[in-house]
Amino acid sequence: MLQIACPWCGVRDEEEFRFGGEAHVVRPPAGAGDAQWADYLFNRTNARGVQYERWLHGYGCGRWFNVARDTVTHEILRVYRMGEPKPMVQSEQP
Amino acid sequence: MKRYSFVTLAAAAFTGHRRWTKVWRTPQPKPAYDVVIVGGGGHGLATAYYLARKHGIRNVAVLEKGWLGGGNTGRNTQVIRSNYFWPESAAFYEHSLRLYEGLSPELNFNVMLSQHGILTLAHSDHELESLRRWTNAILINAIDSEVLTVAQIRRLVPLLNVDARFPVRGGFIQRRGGISRHDAVAWGFARAANALGVDIVQQCEVTGFLTEGDRVKGVETTRGRIMSDRVVLSVAGHTSVLAGKLGLRLPISSMALQAMVSEPIKPCLDTVVLSPVIHMYVSQSDRGELVIGGGADLYTSYAQRGGLTVLQNNISALLELFPAFTRLRLMRQWAGIVDITPDTTPIMGKTAIQGLYINAGWGTGGYKAIPAGGDTMAWTVANDQPHPLIRRFGLDRFASGSLIDEGAAAGVAH
């Protein structure tokens, strides 16, 4: 089970949270073509290793925040707030 | 290929079963092949088999980074069915079910197909209504499906607690659904493909691709460079990682899906029982073990292990419906990395890179699709155009918006 440190509530168990997919996905401009929209809506990096992702503390404060997590070890490397720039995080995994 | 029959079995018995020979070769990879298939799971092996048997393309390699059938093919819960909603899915999965029905004689290998039916439960009147609609759709697709009353379900599954916290209000069954032995499917395809000249190379991980302009020319592996103008990606949860090496971004999220088996017990469950709402399905294998599964761990993962939270929910749902199972012990629990697409429909066919074919996005239900996946991918590679059954499964559907939303038909919500 993951233990996630909500920026507002502190460390809580995985069951209180909901995974919200990859973070920092940028919405294309209004005049973008189908391929660009498809990329925005559906395509994902699906990283093996460090992934930047959003979580919702649904059964807690109800707020969204960002997490940098290693998708192989499940280690949570950094928790940061919505709107903050993507931090450069290195995983200890070789 | 030494054919298996009652006579060969009896002859082997007279020599104390000491003279069985190896079923497939362990070849060194050649420098070049007509077709390279990445991934030695069910889909990859089936593609190789049908390429060799139906299209005469026998200079084929299947490259497997671990051992044959050691990924999701050996980790799934063996369920086979074709009770999908949309016509495109129904046509494809029905083709697969029919191939499964003839697979043991086709491969001369007993895949232990047991069509004891798959029963989907409804726990409220509203859910029963939507199961009725689903059943109608299945019947319109000319596939068998039947709504059952609570009394009929009681007779079929006497151990089921219909007065559970979420009481059983009815259900529907596809009687031609069931299970088969997943290892046998991998081994059967491998043995038959090997006999037709296909090289199955285990312990050979693909680390990169060779390209020339927008054409694929071969692969880099841990056992050297292998040239081929046609490369098929059949690597389930790791598709994004390999496609990423070519700069392709895919609509796939990799997640862990758990399963578990109990200790073996006497026959007590004669169908697959599935509850979409409380996230549980269970069947009994020929060895007597209860095979149990549920929802995926809902965050992306490449870890091949699941969290205890999901396991606990899964087990509590099982025990609420089958109180008799509370005394059983679990023998094994594991997870596989499944490749989930936004519309729960696979991604099959050609890619933006010439000669690179993709067979992915099976999510939580790729096992039932193995024969049809192999058959249609082999046709696609041989003809360099998508097989009619998979024309709607292409990557282009995400830009055109013509998705095939099978979210409900995944059986258990993921």
Image (spheres, coloured by chain):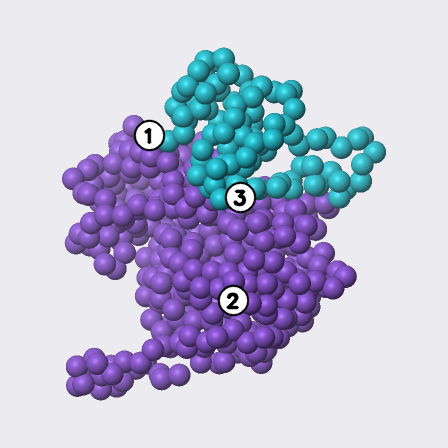
- Numbered disc in front, either 3 or 1: 3
Residue A62, position as x, y percentages in the image:
51, 16
Q: Residue at x 60, y 75 (%)?
A: B32
Give the crowd class for mark 3: few <14, some 14-19, many >=20 residues within 10 Å.
Answer: some
Chain name for mark 3:
A
User: What distance separates the C-alpha of mark 1 from that of mark 2?
Assistant: 54 Å
- Tell me the amino acid under the disc marked 3: Arg
Q: Which mark is residue B223?
A: 2
Instruction: Please give the letter of the chain rendered in purple.
Output: B
Q: Quadrant of residue B30?
A: bottom right
What SS does tag 2 mark?
Answer: loop
Q: Quadrant of residue B167?
A: top left
Q: Colour of chain A?
A: cyan
Residue furthest out toward the right: A31
Q: Nearer the viewer, residue B142 or B298?
A: B298
Q: Are marks 3 and 1 on the same chain?
A: no
- Whether residue B12 is visible: yes
What SS does tag 3 mark?
Answer: loop
Q: State whether residue B134 is above or below residue B20.
A: above
Q: Residue at x 39, y 71 (%)?
A: B188
Q: Residue at x 26, y 86 (%)?
A: B7
Give the crowd class for mark 2: few <14, some 14-19, many >=20 residues within 10 Å.
Answer: some
